Amino acid sequence: MSATAIQLKTAAIDVPEYDAVVIGAGFGGMYALHTLREQGLKVRLFDEATGVGGTWYWNRYPGARVDYPGGPFYCYTFSEDLIREFDWPEKQPDQPTVLRYLNFVADRLDLRRDIELATRVTGAAFEEGVQRWEIETSKGTRVRAQFLVCAVGALSAAHVPDIPGVASFKGECYHTGRWPNDRQVVFKGKRVGIIGTGSSGIQSTPMVAREASHLTVFQRTPQYSVPAGNTPTDQVLVAEARKDWSKFRNIMLTTPIGAPDMPTTIRACDHTPEQRRETYEAAWRIGGLGPILVSTYCDILTDRQSNDWLAGFVREKIRAVVKNPETARKLLPSYLIATKRQVMDEGYYETFNRENVNLVDLREDPIIEIAADGVRTESGHHSLDMLIFATGFDAITGALQNINPRGRGGVPLSTRWKERFNSWLGLTIPGMPNLFMIHGPESPCVLYNMPLGAERQSDWIRECILHMRKHGIGAIEPAPGADLVWAKEVEEIANQSLYPQTESWYTGSNIAGKHRQFAVHLGGPAYFARIRESADNGYEGFVTEPERRAATA
Ligand code: N01
């Protein structure tokens, strides 16, 4: 027996072995654990957090809630029992409700026995000889698994910008995506600053303003926000959905973003200016993202004129709400509406009519530094007791890059993704055998109903693993060049839209030094048909190796 074989045998004794390791206890990871375990696989799930919930564990900032599709449709769809057993009180459930739901699911499906919390995966390396991943954790433990399922979250690597003096602030300091879970953050009587006006900043601003003695909002790019229009859940709709869930689910499987409503086919130019105004006004009254983006006109994200008409309407609404014309001017966005993630709010623009709120336009008055007691901009010093970074995430790729798995030849992901975030089907990465991503780059991820997308990708992964087991396959990975074919497809679809024309976290432009790539597959159902097609054609675009495990056992 060779020295290597002895080492492997020793390692096999010392290191717990699983069929699959899942990283992340959010919607994606919990479902992957469940569905793989149902097939008799031995699975271990690790998460850094002290509770399940993923994004809904971390994003506890005031005002955090689901935007779209909401309520009984932003949840697991695979089980009629789960649909029947959990009541969603609101159309746009708040963070505590979604977290309660995920805890309910963890108990209901008995997931906790295979979940190891407070355990960050710090590294992973593929051992070619045994076709297994060796995984290291923050507890200093190691495990092995044939398959590594990375459900690490598309919006989980919190980003704090490198502003001079950022570490010197002596007051309370928080990031919306890492909100404390062990205490209530109290704003009362405090001078609070919020940097960032994306979804998190816009959701939290009205809530903080109600409590704080003073709130300063530091805005770099003004956003278009639409009224949330949140309501109690429509019980008639819920009853209908529970009665014939498969009908609802089947509709969701066919719509572009996995929502229960079919988008309109009317173009903005099909209507007169009066009809357009009526259409926009009706959607504005209902509120929420679906009515304005999906049900008004079909070409908002493909036609500049259509986009401009809607943008003009929203700008008018902002001017009408904000009383101080100078503040209103600063709040007016100019980019192509909805090409940054569309935001909705509960009284965001109205907040700027409050006496205790002021807006700093960082385009006109940039931050010079963060000091111990506040933020200094070109025009002066803003004294603060608390600073909130609502500055977003190293989106889509950041969390996996932080783990930086090492694939074939010990080559790390940082090398593989140096030039572009390449994948095959948005599920697998060249040179990383048996590693699967949920909501990875070049998949629909953030522009699709995320729980449903995670289910559909996990189902594909489960089938792939079962196929491998059935056919004695030990390793699977993208065939040479498959990633280039996929990149072309993703890019071609993206270029039919207006998305790539705006700097946003979709394109990676929010992170200094990150290369620009529109990393979302916009195909919706076509994407899922495409990954199905690969599987049906014997995992087209992949190369495989026979199982070698017996040789080293
Ligand atoms: O982050 P963002 P987020 N100086 O990246 C600004 C999801 N989500 O946490 O636009 C000053 O959108 C930055 O400015 P700019 C949703 O998908 C969903 O708000 O880059 N400002 C921007 O204003 C969402 O899109 C919900 O010029 C700086 C802000 O920080 C995604 O998560 C709720 C700066 C970051 O906005 C991320 O949202 C919340 C700097 N140096 C989040 N750097 C739901 O409702 C950045 N900014 C389901």
Image: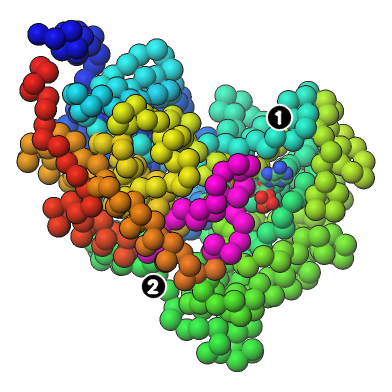
Q: Quadrant of the C terminus?
A: top left
Q: Where is residue 442 drawn, in percent x and y?
A: 40, 53
Q: Where is residue 150 in the image (x, y as percent from the top left)?
A: 35, 36
Q: Residues within 10 Å of mark 1 (few under 14, many from 20)?
A: some
Q: Which residue is drawn at 44% across and 46% down?
A: 421
**Circle 1: element type:** strand
Q: Residue 395 shows which numbered tag?
A: none
Majority secondary structure in the magenta region: loop
The percent coordinates of residue 239 (x first, y second) are 33, 61
Category of crowding for the residue at label 2, using alpha-carbon neighbours closer than 10 angstroms: few (below 14), some (14–19), many (at least 20): some
Rendering coords of residue 148 (x, y %): 29, 33
Inspect the image, locate mark 2, and give the three-letter code of the amino acid beneath it: Met
| Residue pointed to by mark 1 | 173
Q: Can see residue 254? A: yes
In the image: residue 272, left or right of residue 552: right
Q: Which of 492 and 294 is in front in this view?
A: 492
Q: Which residue is drawn at 17% across and 41% down?
A: 544
Say how many tags the image has.
2
Q: What stretch is highlighted in magenta?
A: 499-524
Left or right of residue 480, residue 207 in this image: right
Q: Is residue 203 visible?
A: no
Residue position marked by numbered label 2 in the rendering: 262
* Image quadrant where one finds the N terminus: top left
Say which of 72 and 150 sits in front.
150
Q: Would you identify the image quadrant in which residue 41 lies? A: top left
Taking depth in this image into account, of 336 and 30 the one nearest to the observer is 336
